[in-house]
Image (spheres, helix red, strand yellow):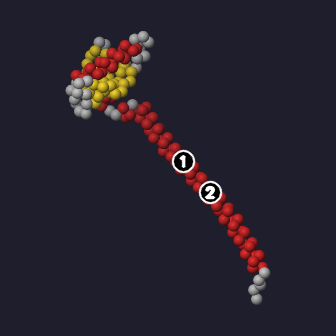
Amino acid sequence: MKLYSLSVLYKGATKSNLLKAAYDLSSFSFFQRSSVQEFMTFTSALIVERTSQGTRASVKEQEYLCHVYVRNDNLGAVVIADTEYPQRVCFTLLDKNPREADAMTKVQAELDETKIILHNTMESLLERGEKLDDLVAKSEHLGNQSKAFYKTARKQNSCCEIM
């Protein structure tokens, strides 16, 4: 059971354009990989061009099964897998948002979001810490000024006695 390719294409009026694709060619020899990738890209584009909007289809090509889904907005996706890979899983993958389809991607997205929140919290704490340091310095300065004022006032008042 193996998934070889996942491609996202835009179905234009005359031909389809590949937007993004991911391939797992590890089961092929090094010298075959570029040819196999080219074959998968060509087959994906051809299948999307021949599939009407809002439909799903499965096409057998040699020993591979190509599962395609073209949405009503002309965005198409193709999964190329071996014949043992479950068709239901392929179409579930094509229907879902990729971030929600894979548990690890979902967890990674949540971690990234948590990192951003934590980073913002740390920045605000550091800013508050700097503000507290400024307040402490101003408080010490004000304390020193009040002591100086008290001493000056005592000297001024020592020359005059109250009768």
- Asked if the residue under mark 1 is in contact with the one under mark 2, i.e. CB atoms within 8 Å, the reply is no
Q: Residue at x 28, y 30 (%)?
A: 75
Residue 58 image-quadrant placement: top left
Mark drawn on residue 102: none
Which residue does the numbered mark 1 point to in the structure image? 123
Identify the mark nearer the N-term, 2 or 1: 1
Asked whether 99 or 141 is in front, the reply is 141
Q: Secondary structure at mark 1?
A: helix
Q: Quadrant of the C terminus?
A: bottom right
> Residue 114 at what x, y percent from top left?
47, 41
Residue visible at 29% across and 12% down? 62
Horizontal and vertical percent position of residue 122 = 54, 47
Separation of marks 2 and 1 at Cα, in angstroms: 17 Å
Q: Secondary structure at mark 2?
A: helix
Query: Can you tell which quarter of the image residue 95 is in?
Result: top left
Write down the residue under mark 2: 134
Which amino acid lies under the numbered mark 2 shown in the image of this protein?
A: Asp
Q: Quadrant of the image for the N terminus? A: top left
